[in-house]
Image (spheres, coloured by chain):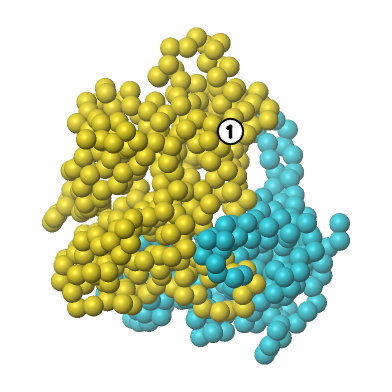
Amino acid sequence: MPTYSPTYSSGGGSSESLLRVTGLCKRYTRGSLWRKRVAVAAVVSADFGISRGQTLALVGESGSGKSTVARCVARIERPDAGQILMQGADIAQLAAAALLPFRCRIQMVFQDAVTSMNPRFSALEVIEEPMRIRRETVHDRRDRARALMIEVGLSPDWMHRSISNFSGGQRQRIALARALTMRPQLLVLDEALTGLDVSTQAQIANLLIDLQAAHRLTYLLISHDLALVARLADLIGVMAEGRIVEAGPAQQIVSDPEHPATKKLLASAKAAAGKLTRITGASL
Amino acid sequence: MVGPRDLLRIRDLAVMYSAEEGVPIRAVDGVSLEICAEEIVGILGESGCGKSTLAGALLQLLAPRAKCEGEILFRGRDLLNLSAAELRSVRGRDIALIPQDPALSLNPVMTAGSLIGEVLRAHLPLGAERRRERVMGLLREVGFDRPEEIYSAYTHQLSGGQRQRIAIAQAVACRPALLVADEPTSKLDATLQSEVVALLSQIRQQHGTTILIISHDPALFAGFADRIAVMYAGRIVEVGKSVEILGRPLHPYTQALMRIATSSVATGARANMRLPAIAGESPNPGCILEGCRFEPRCPERMQVCSQRYPQAFLPEPTRPVNCFKYGG
């Protein structure tokens, strides 16, 4: 099976490389008390790069290894092999202390925002928690949290409300505000738009576009929804069985897919779209 | 009173949750809907609009602090007046639920076979041998080619799609007249979604099952539901044939929703193009507005919209729409 080593540069503007991943490999062991432990390769080999201000989307079916790549890049997992070069520095094997400065530069947002938040916290406590860990002053924390709440479209009047009083879309906004407190360069968005309503999804997608422009953010977007990703990504990498089987500019992947895995994803996206467009008459 | 083909008639249904302080929250408010036998009806609405509460009310599976008003006539009997024992014999046998997240609803210490067998045991007098045969047949029906392997599997050994099939097998085990499917595909990826929809269509075709399916995604209903009721903030704002609602929506909320749905299906669109989102959020059910509930977000709002709730107007004979655009 051929693996791709994408070497293209960004579409327009900068081509300053922010992240380059080579030969990434991650195995999990599976087994139980009674059964022999066996290693399962979640990611066999992944190579890709993202330039500053770009969006790279990794798409694939459940189990294709896309979330494992995301978790390795955010260094929630330690890869078994390979390099993760963040502005030239390899963070793949760094220990906790050495990772600290990179933790700020790379922030992660999860699918189910609420499971990544303390349910007893208020919106303010959630957003300022990373700043508290970094021992910033109460005054700075409050100011920054307030500004970020406004920026992600939440009223600062709500900062003392408990997390449980916010809707799914609002919690995703809070998660984005929390990620932005650290002034990150790279946001890893692991299915961050999945499970939201159609209308909420559109709002959050627009917010991501605005935040990217305002902060010159780089996104690594993980999703199974090719139709949605085509709206947001500059580059798309298609994953299957732990490998990136096809990669290229979003336009090209969607209009001229080569690998069977890409064709399958596109077919199911188009099947859903086709039924609707047959009724609505909207053209693709 | 109930027409021969009406299987379910919901009339002026309201569901209130008593809040710890202040006025109770009306999650469902004055909902009326008729469902004919063998029909597939979709409830379209976003989270918090009351669509899951509506599903819960149909099965009388709501939190104890919820209070229902109105009527839910199932084959002429009002479900709101049934005793607990009568309800137990209806639930699972006449009306069954396919839950949103089978990972939460399936008992993790039971095998798939005993989970389905349990439903049969509760309602049908079958011997163990016959029951096992029925379970095997059901597993085959929901798409497992080798049911023996699945029969003794625990839910943690199954994928999300397989779990949803087990939940569907449980729901159809006693051949219920009405299936209530609450977002049955929202946790699944696109390929699995279309498989579940195909399976539900097949169940209707083979057994004449009536299906009430709840979703936030208009695309799910296309080519599947016969009729759609659009819910917003606890009320139905528009009802019509599926083709009409999706192809020619009349309520401004449905129109906005369809603009988003048709734009996000446009694969091959330019990157970083903003989507036609609806500004704002749906109202907090704790402080419901006097007028139209969509008014604050509506691009076509008029003065009257904030003053009183629009009754159903009939811009076309078969299409009730609760919007002052069509009368007043």
Rendered shade, chain B: yellow
View extreme (right): residue: A2
- Left/right placement of residue B213 relative to residue A165 reads right
Report the number of discs.
Answer: 1
A250 or B70: nearer the viewer: B70
Residue B30 in the image, given as x and y percentages of width and height: 21, 51
A117 or B46: nearer the viewer: B46
Image: B197 above or below A263: above
Residue displayed at 79% across by 73% down: A6
B115 or B196: nearer the viewer: B196
Chain letter, cyan? A
Quarter of the rendering containing residue B249: bottom left
Residue A261 in the image, given as x and y percentages of width and height: 74, 56
Q: Is residue B298 among the parts visible in the rendering?
A: yes
- Dot 1: element: loop
- Left/right placement of residue B7 relative to residue A93 reads left
Subunit of label 1: B
Residue B174 in the image, given as x and y percentages of width and height: 45, 24
Q: Amino acid at mark 1?
A: Val
Image: B284 above or below B295: above
View extreme (bottom): residue: A13
Would you name the residue on which mark 1 appears? B142
B63 or B291: nearer the viewer: B291
Quadrant of the snapshot with the C terminus of chain B: bottom left
Residue A145 in the image, given as x and y percentages of width and height: 38, 77
